[in-house]
Image: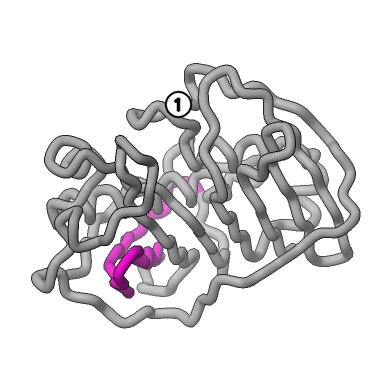
Amino acid sequence: MIYTKNGMVSGSLIDTSTNLSVIGTFQIVEDALTELMGELKIDGITAKKLYNAMWVYTKNRIKFLKPLAWGEGYTVESFVSLISLAKINIDTAIKDNNGEIVAYSKVELCALDLETGRIRKTATVGVDESIVKENSQIQIDFTKFEALEMDKVESVVVRSTNIDFCHHCNNVEYLRFLLNTYSVAELENNPIKEFEICYANQSFEGDTLDIFKMQNQDKDILIIQKEDKVIIKCEILR
């Protein structure tokens, strides 16, 4: 099944160049992905009510291929591209009115048991043979990236508006924390081409998070930690 919806780039989705922003892209992906899961009856609310479980992002990689300006229409397509014993992958393509892909995301998710916090088998949270997998429209692979020498650049506190219905910090909120370590000039003069986030652990309201960054000419590595525990690892290609 390919879940499809149409939209228009609104003012809340644009950056300082009046194009679809990085955060706006993440928001479109998150909405389409959750709506697809709702259609398949495997969404987070259903998982919580029926299976005492919750879905969490473990990885998300997005390629930004071309700009999409304020007021332009787009079509978003979201579909399951992989099902395994313990995880699913969902691909999302955002296309302009000519059918060209402007951004493409692959998200890896797993389900956690609400009592034990352990990973649940996908078959125990409603993922069955009725869910049809589709082929990826763009080759996009998760990578392994490490950073050896990193500088602490900022500390943030998780606030109430960062929290989602699972009572942990929402995945898009981490993106805001990371992007706020850049200046407007940096983002305008050297735009992001590709972005991968690995979600290692959860954080909660009141947690203090430290952000570390290592910058190279065309690739940055960022890590968010709570004390000595890694919460997020991120690779940004520019």
Q: How many marks?
A: 1
Residue at the spot 73% in from the left edge and 38% down from the top edge: 228
Q: Quadrant of residue 237?
A: bottom right
Describe the colour scheme in one phrase: one colour
Q: Is residue 235 left or right of residue 162?
A: right
User: Which corner quadrant of the image does residue 145 belong to?
Assistant: bottom right
Residue kind at label 1, given as amino acid type:
Ile
Q: Is residue 184 visible?
A: no
Instruction: Judge by depth and name the residue closer to the eye, 142 or 200.
Output: 200
Q: Position of residue 174 (x, y in %)?
A: 58, 39
Residue shown at the point (28%, 68%) measured from the top left: 80
Q: Nearer the viewer, residue 17 or 103?
A: 103
Q: Which residues are magenta?
A: 70-95
Q: Where in the figure is residue 127, as x and y percent of width and height?
A: 18, 62
Percent across and percent down for residue 22 are 57, 49
Say which element carries label 1. Answer: loop
200 relative to 160, above or below: below
Residue 80 on the magenta segment: yes
Instruction: Specify whether 167 is left or right of 45.
Output: right
Residue drawn at 38 percent across, 48 percent down: 118
